[in-house]
Image: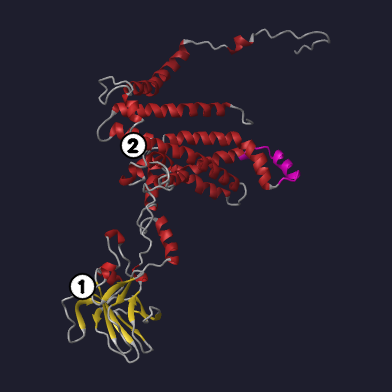
Amino acid sequence: MTTLAMPGEQEAPDATPPAAAKKRKWNRTSIAFVVPAAVWLGLIVVYPVVATIRYSFFNESGSSFVGLTNYKNLFTSDALLTAFRNNFIWVVIFPFFVTFFGLVFAVLTERIKWATAFKTIIIMPIVFSTTASALVWSSLFDLNPHVGALNALVETVSDWFNPPGAYPVDTAAGQTVASLASSGVRVAPGSNLRSVAVVRPGGTVRLGLVGISPATLQVLEAEPATLPKAQPGAVTGLVWRDFSPSHPASRTGVFRDEDGLPNLRLSLLASNGSSVASAVSDRHGLFAFTNVRAGAYHVQIDSSNFRSGFTGVFWLGTQSLTPTNSVGQTAQALLSVPLVDMSMIVTYLWIWCGFAMVVLAAGLASLDRAVLEAARMDGATEWQTFRRVTMPLLAPVLTVIFVTMIINVLKVFDVILNEPPGSSQEGANTLALSIYNFGFTGGIHTGLASAIAVILFLLVVPVMLWNLKKLKQPSNG
């Protein structure tokens, strides 16, 4: 029965002291449950940490104390300085973009009708292993447009504006337009090839080229070269693959072992160098300029025939996105951003944007809608409401995601190991991958690998503790 206090009277204090109510008493049963967990935690966490710190002060075999030598080597090695630079690039770029895109996707899920399907598509990549995702994106970024989807897309757009010639010059193999000139052909300005002989209406001209791949002729369905026939009022001619210069034309008018060059664009040049007519060679290499006025002309094989098409962008290469030739080499190395880093950051965004979207969508769902409606009733636009109301309310969630992603990329490893080709591995190196390379591959450098692990541990722990502190704070910040 509850006793009501009379006016002027005070309620009797609780007989149980608060300190006594909160006090936890340890007994044998609780200790029996805690000790195995504590021992296991010590074996898998505490001991490896202590052993790693110890080995960082010893030589490669762990038998001789070397002091701070490993740490000195860590900060003087070019390869490890590259790893520090790459980790810095990841920390600066990735957390910002993954938080930004996660917020954009979370807002979209509240505005579109097919939100469930959209969420499924965005969250799906996190289900796959990072190694599998890295291998998939390695194929997408492949240099060969026939393999890499991204280069295939760029090639399609590039060919719209800059179509390749039928006989592209392989500059990678040292080939030039000048190296193609053979019988009756000389090099003209603008990488054009021009006939040596002057031709008049009713005359013929022969233009031989060398260095043309038989595979190209097979694709173009070339036929054996035949002698051109003179036509009144026209300039006719032949362009052929001059594979056997010692073989004269036979009496039948067929060149032995030699094919015509089809689909070549040619121009008829007047004495002043202007183009007065154009033609395209057929499968036998024959061409004709009709209705030509009297005069002396040269026939020109246009340089557009030898224009190379899109050869692919080496997305996983170590070429820099930000060349800085005006600064010193050290500053340039620190400021430049390798293309391979940006490509792998795109892969990691594809993986982790779903995680950021889900967390931020939960944060948006927990917001007080009355505050948002009040802002709209006060005349705020959607952008003002989002910037002045939604963003401040979401600040704690945004901070947690941002810091969590910093911890994540400080330890990035598997995508670096599996996505770039071997030629780019060194330029894409990170601290976590350096631990693997020095500790487990090639010559084992236990001391140096342990020193890198200690540095990485010291970088991660403060951020992790700060993140845990933020998680413990109330959701209202």
| Residue 5 forms part of the magenta stretch | no
Outermost residue on the left side: it is 246
Does residue 18 appear anywhere in the picture?
A: yes
Residue type pointed to by label 1: Phe
* Magenta residues, start to end: 364-380
Which is nearer the eye, 186 or 114? 186
Residue 79's mark? 2
Residue type pointed to by label 2: Ala
Which is nearer the eye, 8 or 58? 58
Quarter in which the C terminus is drawn: top right
| Residue 366 forms part of the magenta stretch | yes
User: How many neighbours does mark 2 have within 10 angstroms: few (below 14), some (14-19), or many (20 or more)?
Assistant: some
Dot 1 corresponds to which residue? 243
The answer to which quarter of the image holds residue 166 is bottom left
User: How many neighbours does mark 1 have within 10 angstroms: few (below 14), some (14-19), or many (20 or more)?
Assistant: some
Residue 2 x/y as whole percent: 75, 13
* Residue drawn at x 43%, y 48% as measured from the top left: 321
Residue 250 x/y as whole percent: 17, 84
Q: Is 74 rendered above or below residue 228? A: above
Q: Is 456 rendered above or below residue 103? A: above
